Image (spheres, rainbow, N blue to C red):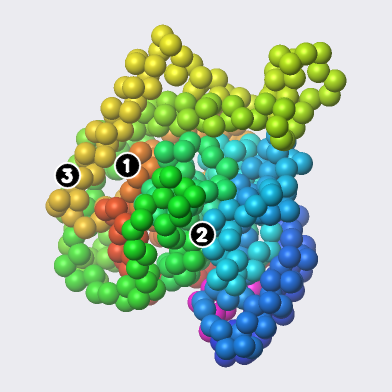
Amino acid sequence: MHHMTLAEIARGLADKKFSSEELTQTLLARIVQLDPQLNSFISLTEELALSQAKAADARRANGESGALLGAPIAHKDLFCTQGIRTSCGSKMLDNFKAPYDATVVAKLAAAGAVTLGKTNMDEFAMGSANESSYYGAVKNPWNLEHVPGGSSGGSAAAVAARLLPAATATDTGGSIRQPAAFTNLTGLKPTYGRVSRWGMIAYASSLDQGGPLARTAEDCAILLQGMAGFDPNDSTSIDEPVPDYSASLNGSLQGLRIGVPKEYFSAGLDPRIAELTHNSIKALEKLGAVIKPISLPNMQHAIPAYYVIAPAEASSNLSRFDGVRFGYRCENPDNLMDLYKRSRGEGFGAEVQRRIMVGAYALSAGYYDAYYLKAQKIRRLVKNDFMAAFNEVDIILGPTTPNPAWKLGAKSSDPVAEYLEDVYTITANLAGLPGLSMPAGFVDGLPVGVQLLAPYFQEGRLLNVAHQYQLNTDWHTRTPTGF
């Protein structure tokens, strides 16, 4: 049963080939057996999962149906789950049990999804390797000596290892798409505002967006259907109708205009990934797509702009973790200032402290105009580049990452080298656009992904292209040895 996709599980449950409770017990046992190799889970919620599975079976027996009714998933451990630890991968929140469900969690639970647990992540979603977690690094199931990508590496590793069919994730600068590429999955970052951020612990509020990680575009369509929608609790949520994503999967690609930016194929791109990207372009051409060279001239400025804006927002968002209201508190503080200093110094890891300091500096009185304001102006130029490009093409295609997954610890002492791995993904977050990564081949036995970007609220278009591509390739069907 563990090899079934979400779509196959939905059909199996509908045909009464197995029950949600049987499936849930099978996957829980598999997680207990195999996850010690991966460290992809922070918390396993057996009792909750079995009660939800029994309830889903009862709903089906009463005539209800639905693609997510009885389907097992997991949540990245920054989605608040009532009564269950929500740690954000940090010592700061190791003892925090959320008093409410995030909107995403509540929506999926209402649809009948079964929560198996909470997945490991880079601390407060800050990282591209899933090595900054207080609970230890996550391993890539394709090679246990390599990183799975981050910050949603726990969700990605768990799905790639067939511990469960799909999981929620978040993307601030590529944290869904990059782990998807590193673990041979399909990962979708929706348009900013498409999925509610209420109850999703913030890193950078103008960039964060929740989305699905799964093996196929079809499964991402199913999970996104349950996650998306307007939320009055979230001031950044957009009141836009949610289409039937599954209904658009089988549309023809005849005449689809695909833009390929020349800036994507620079000296920093591994030539083997460049070749696999060109192979994907040829495969889409055979399906009727028309390829057009384009330019995104301000892409070169995206990384420095992002690494001013994101830490600035993080320094503001993380100021609430002060040792007073909730979370970690140091032992025996001498006074209030000592309480603040030691609680934050002991509760936050090195990468989080680094980004808080960078952000506080960028927002300080003498440097706001020189750094933060200038970065926001670059952000607008990046968006303008995309708007001009989408006047000429329907989607944009390129590599998801410049390199395959690196070895654990290889970039730990050089954070800038790790930041540079986000070069192709962060522009979508700066502009608020939807982006999808899909499997495109292997380099030295490690998976590689290609990225698709589309205009606002065109997630259906991305899923359609990825689904048609996957009907004509088999990269997404490959399974890591031993899992």
Q: Is the magenta region chiefly helix, strand or loop?
A: helix
Question: What amino acid is labelled 3 in the image?
Answer: Ala
Other residues around mark 3 within 10 Å, as few (<14) / some (14–19) / many (≥20): few
The answer to which quarter of the image holds residue 369 is top left
| Residue that appears at 32% across and 76% down | 250
Residue numbers of the magenta segment: 2-11
Residue found farthest to the front? 232
In the picture, which quadrant includes the N terminus? bottom right
Other residues around mark 1 within 10 Å, as few (<14) / some (14–19) / many (≥20): many
Q: Secondary structure at mark 3?
A: helix
Q: Secondary structure at mark 1?
A: helix
The numbered dot on residue 277 is none
Q: Secondary structure at mark 2?
A: strand
What residue sits right under mark 3 in the picture? 388
User: How far across and how far down the image is residue 79, in percent?
Assistant: 60, 50
Residue found farthest to the top? 366
**Mark 3 or mark 2: whose residue is earlier in sequence:** 2
**Mark 1 or mark 2: whose residue is earlier in sequence:** 2
Mark nearer the viewer, 1 or 2: 1
